Amino acid sequence: MADSKHHQANYKGWLYKWTNYLKGYQKRWFVLQNGLLSYYRNQAEMAHTCRGTINLANASIHTEDSTTIVISNGGAQTFHLKASSEVERQKWIMALELAKTEAKKMADAESDEEEVQQPDKAELTIMLHNLSAKLEDLNTCNELIAKHGHALTKTLSELEATHNPSDAAGNMKAMQERATLFRITSNAMINACSEFNQLSQTQGKRWQKMIQHEHEQRLKLEEMVEQLAKTVVSLEKKARMSVSGLPIRDTGERGMAYSEDDEFVDAPEHQLEDSELTVALPHSSSDMMHRRTDSMESYPDMSSESESESSVNEARVYTTKTSPKKHSQRDHQRTASQDKIRLPKSTSSDSHGSDNSLSRRKRRRRIPDKPNISLNLWSFMKNAIGKELSKIPMPVNFNEPLSMLQRIMEEMEYAEILDHAAKCTESAEQMAWVAAFTVSAYASTLYRVGKPFNPLLGETFEFDRMEDLGWKGISEQVSHHPPMLAMHIDGREWSTWQEFTMTTKFRGRYLQIIPMGIAHLVFHKTGHHYTWRKVTTTVNNIIVGKLWVDNHGEMDITNHHNGDKCHLKYAAYSYFSRENPRKVTGVVTDSKGDAKWVLTGTWDQKMEAAQIVHAEESNKGKPVFETMPHKTMWKARPPPPGSERVYFFSPLTIEMNEPEDGVAPTDSRNRPDQRLMEEGQWDEANRVKVRLEEKQREVRKLREAELERARSEGEGDNGREVPQYKPTWFKKERDNTTGAMMHVFNKQYWDCKERQDWHMCPDIFL
């Protein structure tokens, strides 16, 4: 029997279960968690196979004798269990009953959230009248307490000043009477407060649901109005063209004609003279670097709630057209010239000059459309609640035809930002560009709810775009348990590398992804070395509703060359917040802690930055910054037409999985199940995926068996040592900057590719 030192609602241990196929009781492993009772043949099966589950919310629990327990789920499923002793049976009964009670509470809470009934006008009037009456009672009690308290204080003063015993007796009687009145009034005040508090709590939850419901309805109406406006514009244009006798152009899939004049443009977000915004300030120097320490390599279970509720310092920012008089005219000219910088319109090879594009490879611009294949999500996910998803075999129906090795390379979608940063002569401004680059890495996550393929151990991906984009990179899966990849990318004036792993937890309504590892960036000319950790990503509405992604948390970027820092806050989405959704704010500070630049924007659209020219402290103790005009550091490129049919891939992403000659045999583009999925053959892709994973498990078992034999032989004098698995293109060593162990590039891949020498690559594909 398992130790029950934890909460009784979560319980696990051995029980005997009646099995019809053997006509008797067989020993099984049972796990009670989150109101679900699941059983397995043994503890090892918890990682991959569940034999049965009963939801205790609607289940009946009763005993037949001193050791037998019968659990029935409305006749659909029944467990006949037998404990080894009466004491053990009683422990299970207590845990089951407690879990059943909590499961009922959770089910009731969920049903309350789903059903939002709008009260009529009479009910609202009565509700407001009751609250007003209780508030009036509180005001009356408050006045009486003040009146009787003043009288009691006056009587006490007279009693202290009295020296005549006869007068003292009279004053004592008056004091007792006034004390009694004061006590009665105080009790009335306490009762009135209790009634008001109870009434407020009763109605508060319902008001909150009503507000959320109204908010959702308002968003739907806004979408309808916007669509209606576009339709009206289209109809008016068709009518004008019909009257003038001009031919009507093709309306496309949405039934509306399109031209350059049809574009809807938002109003400017920054009024230079009067604009005001709030940004997040860095934490004190006593905080941990990057807010996570190396001790977190043990992959703890971190919740998004703790991050979103953490206290953050804030500052107000005012933007002005001109800087204070103490700044020279040369500074104005330099800032104005910097504002003229324009980012490239596209990363694809077609966006470059025609002279160069003729000599470059013509890359594909589309992949086959995603087939409309449904899957019973709940039947698959109900046994995955609370488990590590990386250890559960997932069908390709949940995936996108892209490996995690390729997905991590997508962070370079806006690598031109680093090219601009490399040209900066002022370190604080360079930090602002770097911060914008880290935010741009999340732009592709807005609609990308598909799960990338988990790379096989030894799988690689190389992407050589030095000729047209100015960078090339290599990534490799360096560990299987825990899943971990390493990546190294070289640009013309910079290099970046990282070791990426993550913890994932499925919690019923949402999937939480907590990235681990530290990302590095170095500029070759200046030697500025930047590091940062990524924020948490949450995929919401896993079971019911439309999937949507949110990135939230705090990110600290550090320049280890001179001590500059940038603190970014990714605000968590809230129905009741007035802030823009997906908002990101931050401040760049120097080694002394003085603020130099402020950043604001959203992780899905753009980031802007402004240089601070003056800082002062407000009456409330929060700093107020006066800045130069904001300039755009990064702006997301719009998705190509029809991207929803190709997994919302960008042009760069579409090019990543394009077959290419000369790459390593372990490259993700050679993975057969991923290629079959891209071609729309999902059933065959699932069969191939199972064979690949079985092959990987067999190799791992052989490696573990060899290691076990070496250990057993090591007990004698002639023991031998079996080397651990080593990646092909990366080596593990201690990083001099952070002091943590990580995998770094061994600089051999590109030489081997030039010679086409792949003898050291493992055989991982079929």
Image (cartoon, rainbow, N blue to C red):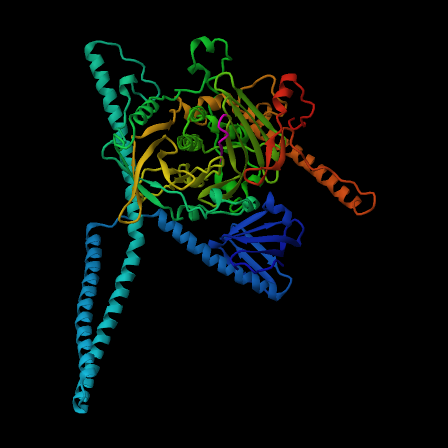
Left or right, 222 with respect to 370, comes to: left
Q: Position of residue 508 (x, y in %)?
A: 46, 45
Specify whether residue 583 is in view. Answer: no
Residue 529 magenta-highlighted: yes
Q: Position of residue 298 (x, y in %)?
A: 57, 46
User: Residue at 67% across / 26% down in the picture?
Assistant: 761
Decide whether the magenta segment is chiefly helix, strand or loop.
Answer: loop
Extreme-bottom residue of the structure = 166
**Quarter-wise, where is residue 584 in the image?**
top left
Left or right, 324 with respect to 81, comes to: left
**Quarter-wise, where is residue 538 in the image?**
top left
Specify whether residue 694 is in view. Answer: yes
Q: Position of residue 640 (x, y in %)?
A: 40, 22
Quarter of the picture holding the C terminus: top right
Total marks placed: 0
Residue 414 magenta-highlighted: no
Q: Position of residue 89 (x, y in %)?
A: 59, 63
Quarter of the picture holding the N terminus: bottom right
Q: Nearer the viewer, residue 655 or 163?
A: 163
Left or right, 151 with respect to 307, comes to: left
Which region of the structure is painted magenta?
525-530
